Image (tube, grey):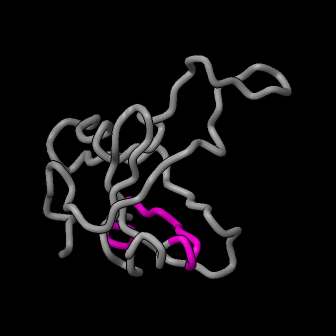
Amino acid sequence: MRRRHPDPIALIQKDTAESYGIRDGEWCTITMANGSMVHRAQVHDNMTPSTIVAEHGWWYPERGSPFDGWDDANINVLTSNGDVKGREVGTAMLRGIPCTLTPGRPPKKAGSHVKS
């Protein structure tokens, strides 16, 4: 599976990617209030402007431990169950979280799966 899908992916709307200087296939840093994370950009024009969709549940078991790297690429690490709650039922906000994008920056612990 890792051979077919070697990197965590962030789907980024085309105009949004252009405004941040991010090109399809390049690494980008997603920054939120709780930190930042690196994913590979996949630029799409069939998304709502100013939208990104980052993969959750990502980790790097090939680094050694079965749980290694979960805090390097799992976008859930950047979400919070603090003061921001969904107004409908009071649950933690998992969608519509403000973020910024920065082009580049390789993963913190680049492994054999990383392609430049």
Task: Tell me which corner region of the image, top left, top right, bottom left or bottom right, holds residue 23.
Answer: bottom left
Is-magenta flag for residue 12?
A: yes
Q: Is residue 35 left or right of residue 97?
A: left
| In the depicted structure, whether residue 23 falls above or below residue 29 | below
Q: Quadrant of the N terminus?
A: bottom left
- Residues in magenta, as a range: 3-16
Front in this rendered view, residue 93 or 31: 31
- Residue at 44 percent across and 44 percent down: it is 75
Image coordinates for residue 22, horizontal then vertical, percent: 38, 74
Residue 2 in view of the camera: no
- Residue at 69 percent across and 24 percent down: it is 85
Q: Quadrant of the C terminus?
A: bottom left
Q: Is residue 22 left or right of residue 51?
A: left
- Residue at 21 percent across and 61 percent down: it is 105
Q: Is residue 91 left or right of residue 116?
A: right
Front in this rendered view, residue 18 or 27: 18
- Residue at 20 percent across and 66 percent down: it is 114
Is-magenta flag for residue 43?
A: no
Image coordinates for residue 76, horizontal then vertical, percent: 48, 37
